[in-house]
Image: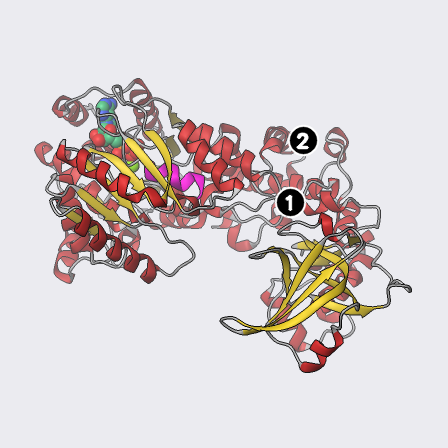
C-alpha cells in the first residue's frame, strides 16, 4: 500500500471538515478517509415507495399517504393532538402529536392529504405513528420519491446524518484505491463480491436493491462483509491461541491423591461426562503451555465438581487456584460447597468479595499473598491490584457469559507469574452450538458435559395467567406442607434495579399475608452480602419454605430440595434467561415443576417462547428454538452470543456461515499467511486485537 493512497489521508483533508466535525468523527473512531467506508449503515429508511395503509404493520418504518378524516385535541395524561388518516386501500392510521401548534391543528383540516414518514406502532385501538415527519401534499400532483434506500449511520450527538452521508460519498469516490486483501481464489469459491462492490452497494444502494434483503442483513453485499469480518475475528483468535501456546505454562502433575479422597467423600459417582471432561482438563494442565479450555454444560450438569477436580490437581502440585464468579450470591454458595469438600482434605478456602467487611477482606488478601490460601473464591474483586497471589496455577471462571473476552485476557495477564501463565478454565451453561463455539472461542479448547446426573426427572413446566395467582398460592402451600421448598421469582425488566427490589418486597408482604404458616425469605440485589448470604443459607438449610427473589438467583444457585419455581411475568424474559432460572429446580431427585405466570394478553412471540419452555428441558434445543423464533435479522443480545463486538456480523444469526469461515481461514493460514495481519487490522480495533491484548 503506497503512502500516497488517498484513502489513507485524514478525514479533515476533505473540504468542509473543520476541527468541530473532526472531533465528532474521532468519537466514532473515524480518522482516515478509509474508515468512513467501514462505518456501515445501522439501518436503512425506505422512502422509495408509499405503502397502502391497509398493508402496514407494527414496527415498520414507512412512507404513507392519507387523507385527514378528523383531527382533535385530547386531554389524557397530557395534552395531545390526534389525527385520523385513511386512504384508498380502506386502511386507516392515527397520528399522535404531543407538541403542536394551533397553526398545525388548523392545517390538518378534514380532506387534507398528508405524506408521512415514521415508525408504525400498535396503539390502543389502531395502528399509529407518534410525531411523524409529514408534508401536506396535493393528491393530484404527486411528490417525487427517493430512488434508493437512505442509509442511517451510527452517529454521535451534534453530528448530522446529512454530514455523514456527504463525507461517505467523498470516500466512495476514492474507492478504487481500496486494497482487496481477501484472496481472489476464495472469493470465487464462495461466490463473493469484491470488497469495493460490496461497500458501494451498502452505502449507496441502487433502486433495484432488495429492501427486504438489506433490512434483514441478507443482501449479498452484507454477506460479503460478514464473511470477511468473521474470518478476521477467527484469525485473530487463532493467532492469539497460537501465541499463547508459545508462552510458558506450568506443567502440573499430581498423584491424584486429593481427587481420590474427594470422590470417596461424595454420596454419588461422577457421571461419564464429568469424568471425561476432568481427564481432558488434567491432560491440558500437564502440558508446558497454559491450558485455555471452555467447558459447557447445561444447568445442573455438575460443573462445580469438575472445577473442584481441576482445582485439586493444581493444589496437589503445590499451586493456588482462583475461582471467579459473576455474583456475590454465587461466590458465597461456592464458598460453602468448596469448604465442605476441601476442608476435610486439610485445604484452606478464602472468600474475596466486594462487600466483605474490611477486616475479613484484609485477612483474605493476606492469606492469598502469603500463599496460605489454596483456593480463593470471589467476584472480580479477586483481580484488583492489591491482590497478589503467591503462586497461582489455575484460574477458573464460572458462568463465563457475564465476563467479556477482554476481561478474560486481562485476567490471564494479571495472573502471570514471572514468565509463567496460569492455566485457565472457563465454564458456562449457555448452550453454544459446536461450530459457533469453535469460532467465537477459537482461542480456547472446548469440552461439553453432555449428560445430567442420574435420577433427575425433567422439570414439568406449565404456563398460567396471572389471574390464577390464588390457585398457585394454594399449590405452594401444599408443596411446602410436604416438605419441599419453593422459589418465587419477581421480574421487572426495563425498570430500575430499585423498582425491581421494591416489587420483590411487596410480593413478599402479599405472600406472607396469604401463607401465614410458611417461613418466607427474600433476596434481591440491593441487600448487603451478609443479608443475602444469611437468607440463602437458611433457605439451603430448609429453615425457609419459600424464597422470594429477583433474577439475582438466575445463575448457579443450588438448593436440591427446592422443587417448585414460580416465575412472575415470565413473558418479559428471554428464553435463555428463563431456562437458566428454571435450572434452579429439578436438581434433586424429587419431581419438580416450574410455573410460568404471565400477564394477558400474550404476544405471539411470547407465547411461542413459553411454549418452547413447556415442551423442552434441553438447553441446546431451547437455544435452537430461540433462534428460530427470533429469525435472522433480529439483533441478538450480547448475553447470548458471548461478547464479541462485531460491526456487521452476528454469531448466532450468521451461524450457517461458520463452517465455511473455518475452512476459508485454514486456506488463508496455509496459503496466504501475509494476509492475516492486514485482515485483522482492518476489522478489529486495537482494543479488541487480542494478539496485542
Ligand atoms: P451446574 O453445572 O449447573 O453448575 P452444579 O455443579 O451446581 O451444576 O451441580 C448441580 C447439583 O448436582 C449439585 O447439587 C451437585 O452436588 C449435584 N451433582 C453433581 N455431580 C453429580 C453426580 N455425578 N451425581 C449426582 N449429583 C451430582
Ligand atoms: Mg454452576
What residue is pinned by disc 2?
Answer: 671
| On screen, residue 85 above or below 136 | above
Which stretch is magenta?
574-582
**In-front residue for pair 120/449:** 120
Query: Which quadrant of the render holds ligand 1?
Result: top left
In the displayed structure image, the side of residue 191 where residue 412 appears, left or right: left
Q: Quadrant of residue 583?
A: top left
Q: Secondary structure at mark 2?
A: helix
The one of 129 and 349 positioned closer to us in this rendering:
129
- Camera-near label (1 vs 2) is 1
* Mark closer to the chain start, 1 or 2: 2
Residue at screen point 25% across, 57% down: 506
The residue labelled by disc 1 is: 679
| Magenta part, dominant SS | helix
Residue 334 location (% of width, % of height): 21, 41
Query: What is the image's colouring?
Result: secondary structure
Q: Residue at x 60, y 28 (%)?
A: 659
Helix, strand or loop under label 1: helix
Give the image quarter of residue 18.
bottom right
As drawn, the residue found furthest toward the right would be 141
377 sits to left or right of 183: left
Q: Is residue 94 left or right of residue 511?
A: right
Q: Residues within 10 Å of mark 2 (few under 14, many from 20)?
A: few
Query: How many numbered marks does the figure carry?
Result: 2
Amino acid at each position: 500500500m503506497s503512502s500516497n493512497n488517498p484513502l489513507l489521508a485524514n478525514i479533515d483533508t476533505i473540504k468542509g471538515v473543520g476541527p468541530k466535525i473532526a472531533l465528532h468523527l474521532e468519537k466514532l473512531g473515524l480518522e482516515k478517509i478509509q474508515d468512513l467506508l467501514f462505518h456501515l449503515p445501522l439501518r436503512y429508511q425506505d422512502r422509495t415507495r408509499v405503502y397502502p395503509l391497509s398493508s402496514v404493520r407494527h414496527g415498520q418504518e414507512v412512507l404513507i399517504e392519507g387523507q385527514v378524516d378528523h383531527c382533535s385535541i385530547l386531554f389524557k395524561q397530557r395534552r395531545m393532538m390526534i389525527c385520523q388518516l385513511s386512504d384508498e386501500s380502506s386502511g386507516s392510521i392515527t397520528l399522535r402529536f404531543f407538541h403542536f401548534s394551533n397553526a398545525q391543528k388548523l392545517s390538518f383540516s378534514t380532506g387534507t392529504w398528508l405524506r408521512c414518514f415514521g415508525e408504525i406502532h400498535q396503539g390502543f385501538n389502531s395502528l399509529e405513528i407518534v410525531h411523524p415527519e409529514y408534508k401536506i401534499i396535493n393528491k393530484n400532483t404527486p411528490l417525487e420519491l427517493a430512488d434508493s434506500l437512505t442509509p442511517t449511520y451510527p452517529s454521535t450527538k451534534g453530528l448530522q446524518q446529512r454530514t455523514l452521508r456527504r463525507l461517505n460519498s467523498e470516500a466512495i469516490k476514492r474507492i478504487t484505491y481500496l486494497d482487496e486483501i481477501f484472496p481472489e481464489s476464495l472469493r470465487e469459491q464462495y461466490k463473493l463480491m469484491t470488497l469495493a462492490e460490496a461497500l458501494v452497494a451498502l452505502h449507496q444502494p441502487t433502486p433495484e436493491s432488495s429492501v427486504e434483503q438489506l433490512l434483514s442483513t441478507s443482501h449479498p453485499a452484507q454477506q460479503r462483509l460478514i464473511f470477511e469480518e468473521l474470518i478476521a475475528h477467527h484469525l485473530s483468535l487463532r493467532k492469539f491461541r497460537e501465541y499463547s501456546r508459545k508462552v510458558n505454562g506450568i506443567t502440573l502433575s499430581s498423584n491424584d491423591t486429593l481427587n481420590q479422597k474427594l470422590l470417596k467423600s461424595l454420596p454419588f459417582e461422577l457421571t461419564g461426562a464429568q469424568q471425561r471432561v476432568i481427564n481432558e482438563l488434567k491432560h491440558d494442565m500437564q502440558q508446558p503451555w497454559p491450558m485455555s479450555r471452555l467447558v459447557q454444560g447445561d444447568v445442573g450438569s455438575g460443573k462445580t465438581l469438575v472445577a473442584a477436580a481441576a482445582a485439586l490437581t493444581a493444589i496437589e502440585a503445590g499451586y493456588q487456584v482462583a475461582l471467579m464468579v459473576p455474583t456475590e450470591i454465587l461466590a458465597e454458595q461456592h464458598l460453602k460447597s468448596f469448604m465442605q469438600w476441601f476442608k476435610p482434605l486439610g485445604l484452606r478456602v478464602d472468600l474475596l468479595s466486594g462487600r466483605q467487611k474490611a477486616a475479613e477482606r484484609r485477612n483474605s488478601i493476606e492469606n492469598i499473598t502469603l500463599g496460605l490460601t489454596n483456593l480463593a473464591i470471589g467476584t472480580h474483586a479477586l483481580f484488583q491490584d492489591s491482590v497478589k497471589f503467591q503462586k497461582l496455577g489455575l484460574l477458573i471462571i464460572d458462568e463465563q457469559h457475564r465476563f467479556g473476552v477482554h476481561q478474560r485476557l486481562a485476567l490471564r495477564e494479571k495472573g502471570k507469574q514471572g514468565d509463567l501463565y496460569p492455566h485457565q478454565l472457563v465454564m458456562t451453561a449457555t448452550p453454544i452450538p459446536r461450530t459457533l463455539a469453535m469460532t467465537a472461542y477459537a482461542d480456547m479448547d472446548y469440552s461439553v458435559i453432555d449428560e445430567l446426573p442420574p435420577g433427575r426427572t425433567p422439570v414439568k413446566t406449565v404456563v398460567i395467567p396471572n389471574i390464577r395467582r390464588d390457585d398457585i398460592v394454594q399449590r405452594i402451600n401444599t408443596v411446602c406442607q410436604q416438605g419441599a421448598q419453593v422459589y418465587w421469582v419477581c421480574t421487572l425488566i426495563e425498570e430500575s434495579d430499585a423498582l425491581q427490589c421494591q416489587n420483590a418486597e411487596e410480593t413478599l408482604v402479599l405472600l406472607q399475608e396469604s401463607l401465614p404458616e410458611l417461613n418466607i425469605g427474600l433476596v434481591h440485589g440491593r441487600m448487603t452480602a451478609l443479608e443475602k448470604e444469611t437468607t440463602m443459607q437458611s433457605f439451603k438449610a430448609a429453615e425457609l419454605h419459600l424464597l422470594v427473589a429477583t433474577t439475582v438467583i438466575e445463575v448457579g444457585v443450588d438448593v436440591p430440595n427446592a422443587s417448585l419455581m414460580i416465575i412472575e411475568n415470565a413473558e418479559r424474559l428471554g428464553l435463555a434467561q428463563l431456562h437458566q432460572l428454571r435450572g434452579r429446580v429439578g436438581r434433586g431427585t424429587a419431581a419438580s415443576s416450574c410455573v410460568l405466570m404471565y400477564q394477558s394478553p400474550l404476544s405471539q412471540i411470547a407465547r411461542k417462547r413459553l411454549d418452547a419452555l413447556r415442551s423442552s428441558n434441553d438447553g441446546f434445543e431451547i437455544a435452537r428454538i430461540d433462534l428460530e423464533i427470533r429469525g435472522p435479522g433480529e439483533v441478538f443480545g450480547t448475553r447470548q452470543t458471548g461478547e464479541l463486538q462485531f460491526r456487521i456480523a452476528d454469531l448466532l444469526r450468521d451461524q450457517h456461515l461458520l463452517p465455511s469461515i473455518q475452512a476459508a481461514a485454514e486456506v488463508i493460514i496455509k496459503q496466504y499467511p501475509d494476509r492475516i495481519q492486514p485482515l485483522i487490522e482492518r476489522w478489529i480495533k486495537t482494543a479488541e486485537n487480542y494478539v496485542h491484548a
